[in-house]
Image: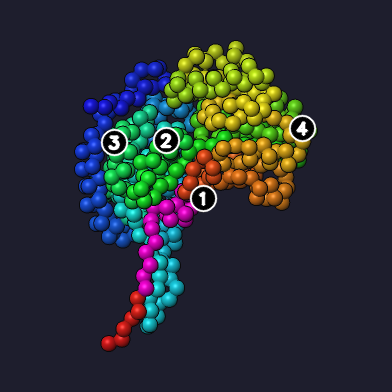
Amino acid sequence: MTIIRCISPVNGEPYAEREALSLEAATAAVARARAAQGAWAALPLDERIARVCAGIEALNAMKDRVVEELAWQMGRPVRFGGEYGGINERAAHMTGIAAEALAPLVTQSDAGFERRIDWVPHGVILVIAPWNYPYMTALNTIVPALVAGNAVVLKHASQTPLVGERLAAAMHAGGVPEAVFQNLILDHATTEGLIRARSFGFVNFTGSVAGGAAIERAAAGTFTATGLELGGKDPGYVMEDADLDWAVDVLMDGAMFNSGQSCCGIERVYVHQRLYDDFVGRSVEWVNRLQLGNPFEAETTLGPMASARFAQIVRDQTAEAVAAGATPLIERQNFPADDGGAYLMPQILTGVDHSMRVMREESFGPVVGIMPVSGDDEALALMNDSDFGLTASLWTADPGRAEAIGRRIETGTVFMNRADYIDPAGAWTGVKDTGRGASMSSLGYRAVTRPRTIHFRKVKP
């Protein structure tokens, strides 16, 4: 028997425990999903949309409970109200475009021929969700998958087991049949066993590079489609004509919000040498205004990281950089709540370079390195000097310049004068070790469906 245990970062004590299903029990659950999927897909599209939207409404009705549970499970301060802004924005957009996104591509429809491409559901889809934005990331795939007529099996992260339970309760309350949307408590071995057994038509995974590699190995030879979003080391580039106050505010928020635990958070910043000193000074002032502490206290803006283990990775990267010559600009005395465990003070590093792990490996915590650059070519070379490519943030008053630079950045999304945001109308995608595939936008529906060609020659009686 395997027990999945959530240790709360708030107090280091067990918060939730669940028994993982055996492979046999999990296989039976997938079989129930497969048996129920056909009837779900046969419902009119408007009916499926209505039930999914009702599920989102039911989730909104749980807000007070959800916000409290998120603080206990992964440390986000309650002042931020959970993830409901993003949940509602993304669900509304994806359900709103469903009819157009799923419409057949008709090439001929007349007395002689019917020729078109239909978009049909894969069948049963596995969603493996992460703990850092546990509702939004899961719903990125759950909403279009259900709307398109799939059954969904959700395996949530061990740090956030209650999230899967709340999502299942909400969707069932909205009218999605219990067999069509199932939250299963699974360990890694059982999850990989199900994938190797060709249990799913599509597997969506959000998490680490190592986790993505494990999914690919499990799927090897099965021809199961996969979507992998594996994180980033996202850069910001502040040009000499940037709005400095706005750049500091957004980039530092992008680096520190959610204790830096965001795949598209800002982890490295390159600043034109004319603005460098001013940018660094204002950034230090900005970060020093953060309040690290208990996520249930109203004044807290920076909660604990999800676990002491994750915080130690950031501490190690920071210490190695300082030992190699980097300068830490945030003083320990300003953040007395740093306990050497999950509560981790924020940090800004200067004197960094790309020989340091903190500038190359994903930190996933509240630390950012800032480097001066002489111009666009140097900044571009540094931005592309990464194994990741999720987003890049450009700061300038010249859209044409941003467009020209953006075309040369190896990334999935190019921002100008903003950062750390998922636009549901844009494809959420990346390159290199960030993974493959796309969610959100109409392409999100392409991921959860497959094309089927209809070619009918009509015979007259």
Judge by depth and name the residue closer to the eye, 114 or 337: 114
The secondary element bearing badge 4 is classed as loop
Q: In the picture provided, is 460 more to the left or to the right than 427?
A: left
Q: Is residue 449 magenta?
A: yes
Task: Give the image location of residue 52, x and y in percent.
Answer: 34, 50
**Residue 408 % position (x, y):** 66, 48
Q: Which residue is mark 4?
A: 273
Instruction: Tell me the CA gap for discs 2 and 4.
Output: 39 Å
Picture coordinates of residue 317, whole percent (x, y): 56, 22
Q: Give the CA distance from mark 4 to mark 3.
A: 52 Å
Q: Which mark is residue 190?
A: 3
Task: Give, as a three-letter code, the residue at label 1.
Answer: Ala
The crowd level at tag 2 (other Cα within 10 Å; few <14, some 14-19, many 20+) is some
Which of the marked residues, 2 or 1, is nearer the chain's N terminus?
Answer: 2
Contact, mark 3 vs mark 1 (Cβ under 8 Å): no
Question: Please, which residue is most extreme toward the bottom here?
Answer: 461
Residue 136 appears in the picture as rendered: no
- Disc 3 marks which amino acid? Thr
The residue shown at (35%, 25%) is 6
Q: Which residue is tagged 2? A: 211
As measured in the structure, the alpha-carbon distance from the residue carrying label 2 to the one carrying label 3 is: 14 Å
Q: Secondary structure at mark 1?
A: loop
Q: Earlier in the sequence, mark 2 or mark 3?
A: 3
Place of residue 211 in the rendered image (x, y in percent of width and height, measured from the top left)? 42, 35
Amino acid type at image mark 2: Gly
Q: Earlier in the sequence, mark 3 or mark 1?
A: 3
Cα distance between the residues tagged 4 and 1: 33 Å
Residue at the location (71% across, 43% down)?
396
> Distance of mark 2 from mark 1, alpha carbons?
22 Å
* Quarter the C terminus occupies: bottom left
